[in-house]
Image (spheres, rainbow, N blue to C red):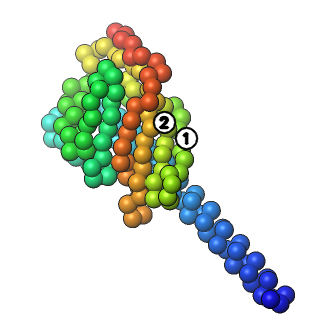
Amino acid sequence: MGKYGRLIALWLTVVVVAGAIYLHGRDERVIRRTWRQLVQQGQGKGPQNLLQSATRATGMLAFFATGAVIEIGAPYPMLIERGELPALLQRAWTYADSIEINRRGEDLSWGTSRETAIMEAAIELSVTVDQRRESGLESYRIYWQKDGRSWRISRIERMAIIRKPDTTLGQ
């Protein structure tokens, strides 16, 4: 290979590596943006009427892959399937005076393929009902699955309770 051949090979290598880095960064930005949007949509002041809460709850399904499962863990050791999510969220938004979700940190790693990612996130959830506020801090493992150009959640597992919910009167 001549001098120009090596330069062309080097240039092509740089272009391929730069493209891979860009695509890797793009996927990470999309996942983190989607996560922020999901958290923002989950919050709210209420209570909301039935139509508002039903519309919001149905819109939340767009963040989840078909067949997605959410494992809440103790003291509620149950699995919630994607189809059950709207009714649960609708009830929460109809009942609560306010729901606040604060992200306390996320760590993102890639699965065995570029089509999956795993996020470990700490979430502080504060819910106010009848002037009683409960707040807790928990960590979750969130499995992401690539769906075309977007990323959807395929599974959520609670990892640990960092701070147990406490109850206080008033705000």
Q: Secondary structure at mark 1?
A: strand
* Quadrant, the C terminus: top left
Write the residue at 42% across / 16% down: 164
Write the residue at 24% across / 29% down: 92
Q: Residues within 10 Å of mark 1 (few under 14, many from 20)?
A: few
Q: Is residue 139 visible?
A: yes
Q: Is residue 37 visible?
A: no
* Quadrant, the N terminus: bottom right
Q: Nearer the viewer, residue 57 or 28?
A: 28
- The answer to which of marks 2 and 1 sits earlier in the sequence is 1
**Residue 4 picture quarter:** bottom right
**Tag 2 residue:** 121
Residue 107: mark in rendering: 1
The spot of residue 12 in percent (x, y) is: 69, 78
Q: Is residue 86 above or below residue 147?
A: above
Distance from disc 2 to disc 1, alpha carbons, whole Å, reads 7 Å
